[in-house]
Image (spheres, helix red, strand yellow):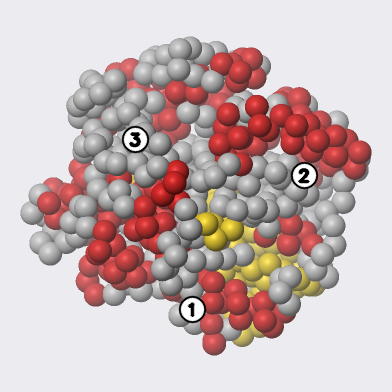
Amino acid sequence: MPFIVDLTSGTVEREHRAGASGHYGGSILGLRLLTERTPAGLDPYDPRALVFVAAGTLGGTRAPGLAKGVFLAKSPLTGVAGEAHALGPFAAGMRGAGVQALAVTGRAERLSYLLIEDGEISCHEAGELRGLGTAAATDVLRERHGQGAHVAAIGPAGENLVRYASVVTDYAYAAGRYGVGAVFGAKNLKAIVCVGDAPAEVADPAAVAAIDRYYRDVLPANPLAALQAGEPGFAGWAGEPPAPGYASVRNFTLPGGLRTPHVRDYDGRAVALRGACPGCPNDCLKVYASPSAAERRSGGLGQEAFLSLGWNLGIDDLDTVLDANALCNDLGLDQVSLGGTLAFAMECAERGLLPGGPAFGDPAALPGLIRDVARRAAELGDLLAEGAARAAARLGPETAPYAMTVKGAELPCFDPRIQPGIGLGYAIAPNGPRYDALEHDLDFDPVAGLAYSFPEAARIGAAPAPAGELDAERGRRSARLLRLWSGLDALNLCVFASSPTRPLTIDHLTALVTAVLGRDFTLEDLLAAGQRRLDEMRAYAEREGMGGRDELPARMHDEPVAEGPYKGAVVDREAFTRARDAFYDELRWR
């Protein structure tokens, strides 16, 4: 039963909607509200646009893998449904305040924030917060409503309608992709504040506790979970550089050659290491910044930050990347889209297509560039605040080949030329490219993959296959993985704790949902929820006239990896078309 808040009229209503079994209070519910309550073709910045925030019926429960909350709106970057997930304690805070799901429409006359307390929602003016970063805004709101308050806030980027502005929860945990923060800004909504500590009740506490014990017992033996739990953690790149072609270097133009900092380089840079997600021992998201950073608390380090703000920009200095990541969170900028947009501008400048533009490999210039984008400062900052695709449209068609985007959103930096299943996910996922939309091809390579995960993957029909192989079966396999992880997203279950590569197996996931909700939940139910979410996202994209854009940038087809173990890897166009058709068939989209 979501709350519907109209910022224009100041009204709050509670919509009574049958059965969480069909939507679980998360993304599927948000998509239905988005479809039912907004007309086709509506500008994302129109006051009638809707933004949905939810813990749902599972998110925020103190158990492994259940910390996630969802933020969803029509994306100002892509024009389709933009769904971003925040880890950390905010979903638990939302549940503690007495609300599982919230939809916001209208536009406040003045900059405002919403307060959720004891199941009641009220709107308050926030003029004094204008221009503040997310950390300073959170400080003010916690001083006002208690240090235990949980806050989801936008920074200057959201206020200035940067099309890839993020919402940042509790200082460091971003809902980063697709510009939901800009939709907050268009509504004059600076923040949502949650006050209360009511527990998220579960139907079978003993069963939940048993799954928690299992998770903690097996965590050290699971290589990915152990990596996440250790220091520097899943997001902190350490050791030898990845093989050439694995990740983007200089806008996917170079095969490799940049240094990877070693784990010892993180000494003294940890701000917080434990307890990010209530009830989960993994602690994937750690908080890092250099000791000299102006704002360290916002340094929640997601896995993509080092790729997008480091190697993709020709930068391999640890402090530069950690500080840039913290600055992005404080200003409210998605690191992936920012990195992709800056890399586009750098390549254009290098090719003489953007005189005076930024240069690859210039760490000293990066903080100023980030601030200029967030504030739309001067002509360049305003241009890059639009994202790479729109910037290319302004600069001219000769720059379009250097915008590494799908559906208008910048690509994550895991290279699809060596992992074509990831490329299929980038191209076909109806909300735009995400690196965590489906499991990586390399994990299921018969030689180099994670063999312990093969039986789990086989349960959904995803048998091992060589990572670079691109055929119809790759299309079917990738669609099945996409559907599984879509089911996790639909229920706000964390992919970084879950099957097929992490400790929560399919049986543990279904048992966990059963224990929390008190009704039987099966693998078939999970896959059905995943299919339903994908279908509703695709239907929304088609309604908005944005269907049929399931293509990768031409570079992925035309420029092979130049050296290293993946030399010659490229996404063959004909093979991609056949695999994409099989992907559609598996999801019943043809």
Label 3: which secondary element: loop
Crowding at label 3, few (<14), some or many (≥20) Cα neighbours within 10 Å? some
Rendering coords of residue 288 (x, y %): 49, 57
Tell which tag, 2 or 3, sits nearer the viewer.
3
For disc 3, the marked residue is: 241
Q: Nearer the viewer, residue 425 or 588?
A: 425
For disc 2, the marked residue is: 63
Horizontal arrangement in the rendering, residue 523 relative to residue 31 (left or right): right
Q: CA distance from mark 3 to mark 1?
A: 37 Å
The mark nearer the N terminus, 3 or 1, is 1
Q: Nearer the viewer, residue 50 or 484?
A: 484
- The relative height of residue 279 versus residue 288 in the rendered view (above or below) is above
Horizontal arrangement in the rendering, residue 367 relative to residue 10 (left or right): left
Crowding at label 2, few (<14), some or many (≥20) Cα neighbours within 10 Å? many
Residues at marks 2 and 3 touching, judged by CB atoms closer than 8 Å:
no
Q: How many numbered circles does the render carry?
A: 3
Horizontal arrangement in the rendering, residue 538 relative to residue 499 (left or right): left
Rendering coords of residue 475 (x, y %): 46, 20
Q: Residue at x 52, y 32 (%)?
A: 438
For disc 1, the marked residue is: 132
